[in-house]
Image (cartoon, rainbow, N blue to C red):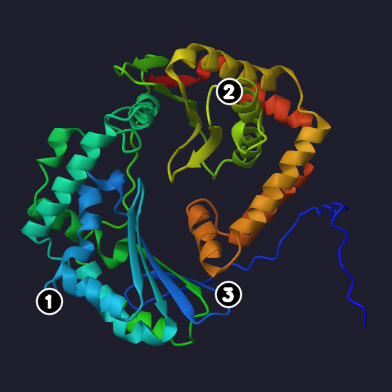
Amino acid sequence: MEMKHPDRKQQPDLQTVDRVTLINPSEFILDNGIPVYCIRAGTQEVTRIEFVIAAGTWMQTQKLVAYFTSKMLTEGTKSRSGSEIYDFFDSYGAYISCEPEKDYVYLALYSLNKHLDKLLPVLAEILFEASFPTQQLSVLMAKAKQDHIVSMQKVNYLAKVNFAAQLFGKDHPYGQHASDEDFDLIDASTLADFHKKYYHPGNFRIIVSGNYHENILKQLNLFFGITISDSSVADDFSQFEINSSGEKKIFIPKENALQSAIRLGKVMMNKSHPDFAPCFILCTVLGGYFGSRLMTNIREDKGYSYGIGAGMVSFRSEGFMYIASEVGADVRKQALKEIYKEISKLTVEPVTDYELDLVKKYLAGSFMRSIDGPFALADKFVSVIDHTGDFASYYNHYLEVLQHITAAELLELAGKYFSQETFYETVAG
């Protein structure tokens, strides 16, 4: 039979993605009350077990405590040193990651299914029996402090941390950043106290993803379901007042800097709000992909920057919109003028049918790539777990909004949220 070859001169038909088949995770409860969400997908005999722990920046009363507590988990337990822990997991070809963020700490184990029964008890040690050895803490702190000192010399970092403080307030969990002195105030006992208060079964969620075996729940219950919480704190998300800066525009001079880092934006909604998806689409038009208006103007037309982007960030309690770029210090003012011009155009001129169609197809394709594989599906689920009880419906609603949103609706949305006087601006350089 003669094999047919595609015509490389003919562009393939573009397909519209209006709905996907997503299955909500299976939900279980361990004997001690820890909720477990399971997403079974993939063909390889690999499983990721991720602990979502309400022990991020939001919970700390002292700067850096949440960060160092999480980073010290693998540096020693009551029965193993940090090097023994690393060697043990490495010997099974397993990998542990621990990422502290604003709301949560994400501790994940990646392993072949056949080794889980050997690895899970050691993972339980890391979670429940971290010892916070002083020597390892000193080494970790010295490196982190030096990295911080180096970062504070970079205009991009200066703009980023000061912009967050400008939006939320320097004492808000989403706006605070550390000083050099804060590193010197960290000690092992403070971390141990924080660990005891927040690293307990009443403060965990477990997300299992991959082609896991049927006995996974029995294994999890054996190693994590028997530990009883001795803490009254369970997912304590007290509210903090947003205290945005009285100055809408802040400039941080950096002598001899060749580049100026720009941050523009404002506090907005998170994924719980019905306007989040439409605003996300609007931000994509503005600066969310390579062909966006900001990239076309600032990079392609004016040559002020190698790159510029706009996007939306959703935390558990709040959200914000941002525009970020680094431009030549000598064209800083011109770049800002053009950025504001593009923002203003969205509020007075409807997006063309061609541009809107392009953005819709880009976002649909981007979404399909973002759910490719069991771990990616789990990431998508975790990103909305605080905002919806139905993972599948949430993303199908997003695709429905994406398919049907009109230029008139985007124009109205821009008028509602993108008034120039509501934007905050931080520039370093």
Using the image, determine if residue 106 lies above or below residue 327: below
Numbered circle sitting on residue 41? 3
Identified by mark 1, the residue type is Ser
Percent x, y for residue 226?
27, 79
Using the image, determine if residue 387 lies above or below residue 283: below
| Residue at image mark 1 | 79
Which element is circle 2 on? loop
Q: Of marks 1 and 3, which one's residue comes earlier in the chain?
A: 3
Mark 1: give few (<14), some (14-19) or many (20+) Cα within 10 Å. few
Q: Quadrant of the N terminus?
A: bottom right
Instruction: Give the CA separation, mark 2 to mark 3.
Output: 45 Å
State the residue at coordinates (63%, 68%).
Answer: 23
| Residue at image mark 2 | 303
Mark 3: give few (<14), some (14-19) or many (20+) Cα within 10 Å. some
| Left or right of residue 14: residue 84 | left
Mark 2: give few (<14), some (14-19) or many (20+) Cα within 10 Å. some
Instruction: Give the CA separation, mark 1 to mark 3.
Output: 35 Å
| Left or right of residue 321: residue 120 | left
Please report contact status of discs 1 and 3: CB closer than 8 Å, yes or no: no
Q: Of marks 2 and 3, which one's residue comes earlier in the chain?
A: 3
Percent x, y for residue 73?
22, 63
Relative depth, front residue between 111 and 313: 111
Numbered circle sitting on residue 373? none
Identified by mark 2, the residue type is Gly
Q: Of marks 2 and 1, which one's residue comes earlier in the chain?
A: 1
Relative depth, front residue between 199 and 116: 116
| Left or right of residue 332: residue 129 | left
